[in-house]
Image (cartoon, coloured by chain):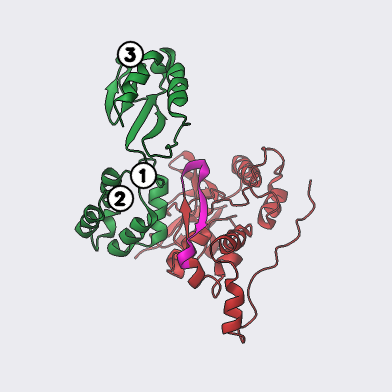
Amino acid sequence: MTDIVLTIDGKEVKAKAGMTVLQAAQQEGIHIPTLCHHEKLEAFGGCRLCMVEVESRGWTSYVVSCVYPVAKDIVVRTRSEKVDKIRKVLVEELMAHAPDAPELIKLAEEYGADRNRFERDASFCIVCGLCVRYCNEVKQKNAVGFIDNGARREISFIPEVARKECWDCQECFTICPTSYAQAAYLLSEALAFPGQRKKIKAEKPLQPKSRVIPIMPAPVTT
Amino acid sequence: MSEHTIDGIIEKYRGQPGSLIHALVEIQHQNHWLPREVMQKVADALQVPFAQVMQIASFYKAFSLTPKGRHEVHVCTGMTCHLRGAAKLRAKVEELTGLKDGETDTDSRFTYQTGACLGSCSIGPELIVNGKHYGRMTPEKIEDVLKQYE
């Protein structure tokens, strides 16, 4: 298969057919910010942060690079005034939900986003779907899923599965950008199968240290 | 609705993950709501993770995750019906049944829902009970209509 040659940030890049613009950029060490992307998971196109400017046959458009396939002779710009503005507003919107998420704070600094721009709806979940997709695609346990639709969409642990699988895995806690996956799990544990961890500890006293991540104190930013 | 009918529907789609929505639609149609145990059965039979069944069932408004009454009462709140006095109809239905939008009464007689637009603007404002359209409704007439449904 022949390589496809495209330009990213003024640099000629070779990519294989079927790759996405994001993959092509990452392979060249060009950084594009992402939140819902994970190398082990199928592209989701959920957070829109990896938006880039693509110039193709004289037309400029804004595309989500994690799902946009590479094409011959396109010119990609990962930073431009408009791209930066799009990312800034996206970060501001996400911060209405998770104002103290470390990744968002870092992005907010980079793009000059105002964390107080939009009215707070502190759901702490930015619906990136990492936990849901990781549990489905990598672990194949489906202990956590999406519930409801549109603005009311949220993640929810299925108690029947979670009580069996989650304590020994907890891998979604580390990939969650906001620590909400952990909070949601602990909440469903408290509601649906309280006291289960004591039982597990009693049965398997020589377990390696549990992987519950201490929730970081909220950084002081105003 | 009998368990037998539901099992029949599930059997028809056994081993076909792609038919998840069809199965749920049929069960919803027969049973008027989707109990958790039934969704678990669907998940097992169709070899779909339960989380996915929940996702689909909660995504579409056509599925109900709570029990419905024997009779479904809809009041249209579309623009035309609204201009022709749907708000008064709603107030009257709410007064007569004691229900708010989306609720079901304790003896499962009525489930009351608003919706827009139910597609019969020319006879608005309208009240729909179990799919039967009552056009040119007035608050005074509602009581007689609801009396027919026990």
Counting from the top left corner in percent of width and height, residue A104 is at 66, 52
Q: Residue at x 33, y 56 (%)?
A: B38
Observer able to see residue A24: no
* Labels 2 and 3 share a subunit: yes
Q: Quadrant of residue B141?
A: top left
Determine the secondary structure under disc 1: loop
Name the side, left or right, on which B20 lies relative to A46. left
Q: Quadrant of residue B46?
A: bottom left
Residue B58 among those drawn in magenta: no
Asked if the residue at tag 2 contacts the one at tag 1, i.e. Cβ–Cβ closer than 8 Å, the answer is yes
Q: Amino acid at mark 3?
A: Arg
Observer able to see residue B124: yes
- Which sits earlier in the primary sequence, circle 1 or circle 2? 2
Q: Which chain is green?
A: B
Name the side, left or right, on which A51 lies relative to B31. right
Q: CA distance from mark 1 to mark 2?
A: 8 Å
Residue underneath mark 3: B136
